[in-house]
Image: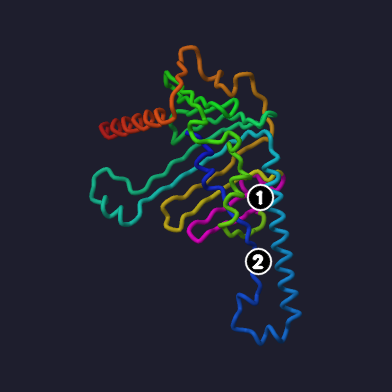
Amino acid sequence: MKKYYFLAALVSFFLVLTACSNDSDENGIEDNDAAAPETDQQETGETDDIASEEEELLEGALDALNGIDQRYEEATITLEMSMDEELEEELGEEENVETDSSTTMDMRSWQMNNEDGSVSERTEIETDGGPVEYSASEDSETSINYTEGDETAYEVEMADMGMDPADVRMEEEQIRELMNTYEVSYEGETSVNEYDAHHFVFTNGEEEIEYYFDTETFVIVQMVMHANDGEVATHMEVQDYALDFDYDEGFFRLEDVLDDSIEVEQVDPDELMEEQLDEDLEDGETEDNEE
């Protein structure tokens, strides 16, 4: 499981900060507009100034994210899912059917941008108290995946996964991709854990995404996604991070995790996904039998 791949689809928005003038929003008061044109122009100018300042703040955050070459991060990610009413009614009378589910992932990650343009990254994820899942890539070309307690680790060609190595966890680019479809409002400064953060809210009418940028480094220290229909809610909160870290040779090849008894098998990504799905189904059947 790759910790930031599912977040990549969530990180997006466009800055539309109160750009409409009062004239377009208040069609019923033309007489007042005519009586006080200077006042309206002054208010519009002030609104534009505020919008410009907030846009500059967000642009500065994105530029800062793009300039980060090394980062260590500890975060908790929670996914909550619920069925729509129609499907819930259809399955409501079935036994052992859960209509709501919640998944919590405790994640540690390391990322380093290399001089040749490749990215070295490593993640360690513990889902709902289960075994730790490791994933590491030294050069953006291959990824080694290993689950704690298994006898085999899997090496996957990242190109076969349809991924551009240059896009690995590029938050700044991910955000800009949807800047043409989301509206944003700046909600001021607040506190996330011990971090002072700029709070932006983005919406497209169907979902709302909140981003909290550290006021000093502009690292995203919290992200909350709400779907209006309530089907999915995502919450990511950073407990700790650093913009540099020490590592040993082989760290991005999991050499400190994989001992000589663990076989590293090269597999096609589709085969790996199919095998993991089969394992999940077997685990589910085992839990049902135990109950």
Q: Quadrant of residue 4?
A: top right
> Is 198 a magenta residue?
yes
Q: Residue at x 39, y 30 (%)?
A: 276
**Is 77 drawn above or below residue 122 in the view shown?**
below
Classified by dominant secondary structure, the portion drawn in magenta counts as: strand
Q: Which residues are magenta?
A: 190-216
Q: Quadrant of residue 66?
A: top right
Q: Which mark is residue 17?
A: none
Residue type at mark 1 is Ala
Q: According to the image, label 2 marks what residue?
A: 19
Q: Secondary structure at mark 1?
A: strand
Q: Give whichever of 217, 159 is nearer the camera.
A: 159
Residue type at mark 2 is Ala
Q: Secondary structure at mark 2?
A: loop
**Is 191 drawn above or below residue 117 in the view shown?**
below
Q: Residues within 10 Å of mark 2 (few under 14, many from 20)?
A: few
> Is 179 a magenta residue?
no
Where residue 84 appears, as percent x and y from the top left, is 35, 54
Q: Residue at x 58, y 60 (%)?
A: 183
- In the shown orientation, is residue 33 left or right of residue 224? right
Q: According to the image, label 1 marks what residue?
A: 197
- In the shown orientation, is residue 162 left or right of residue 16? left
Q: Residues within 10 Å of mark 1 (few under 14, many from 20)?
A: many
